Amino acid sequence: MARPQPSQNTEREACPCGGLSFEDCCARYLERGDIAPTAEALMRSRYTAFVRQNAPYLLDTWAAHTRPATLDFNDAPQWLGLQVKAHLQRDDTHAEVEFVARFKVGGRAHRLHERSRFERDGDGRWRYIDGDLFD
């Protein structure tokens, strides 16, 4: 019996960050090792990594001085969508990205509204430092 061919929808799965297809968007960072060119691109790829529970990528893109030792996805929320509100390039090595991420926990919808801070290391890679939550 012939194996069914994947549908075009399967091959062109939407990227969780709201961009193009996953293959044309965040896969280049999460799976192919490309370096995110901006803090916004990194933030979008990190959101996608949270959706896909990709701890190695998240830890690698977190600044060493604020990075946790491990990430635990037990009781992880169901991520529903991302909206980038603003991207502010402070200088060549510092940027901020304001976003709203929608998610569900226990059937209840919530919003995470944060202004995240990023820095670019000497290796040219952007890394997440920390963020301030909005009410």
Image (cartoon, rainbow, N blue to C red):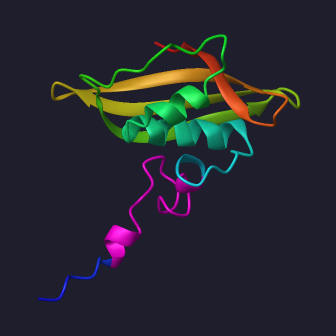
Q: Residue at x 59, y 16 (%)?
A: 131
Rendered residue at 52%/31% (across/down): 58
Magenta stretch, overall SS: loop
Q: Is residue 122 above or below residue 9?
A: above
The residues colored magenta run 8-28
Quadrant where the N terminus is found in the figure: bottom left
**Horizontal and vertical percent position of residue 12:** 41, 69
Which quadrant holds residue 117? top right
Q: Nearer the viewer, residue 125 or 37?
A: 125
Q: Is residue 87 left or right of residue 73?
A: right
Q: Is residue 42 magenta?
A: no
Asked which quadrant contains residue 93, the reply is top right
Of all residues, the one furthest to the front in this rendering is 1
Reply above or below: 10 against 19.
Answer: below
Query: How many numbered marks are there?
Result: 0
**In the rendered view, would you say 97 is above or below 24?**
above
Left or right position of 11 against 104: right
Q: Is residue 8 above or below residue 67?
A: below
Q: Nearer the viewer, residue 28 or 131?
A: 28
Q: Along the line of sight, which residue is nearer the eye, 108 or 9? A: 9
- As drawn, the residue found furthest toward the right would be 92
**Residue 88: image location, x then y, percent:** 75, 31
Q: Residue at x 45, y 54 (%)?
A: 15
Magenta span includes 20? yes
Residue that sits furthest to the left in the current view: 1
Which residue is located at x 38 percent, y 42 percent? Answer: 52
- Image location of residue 32, percent across then percent down: 59, 55
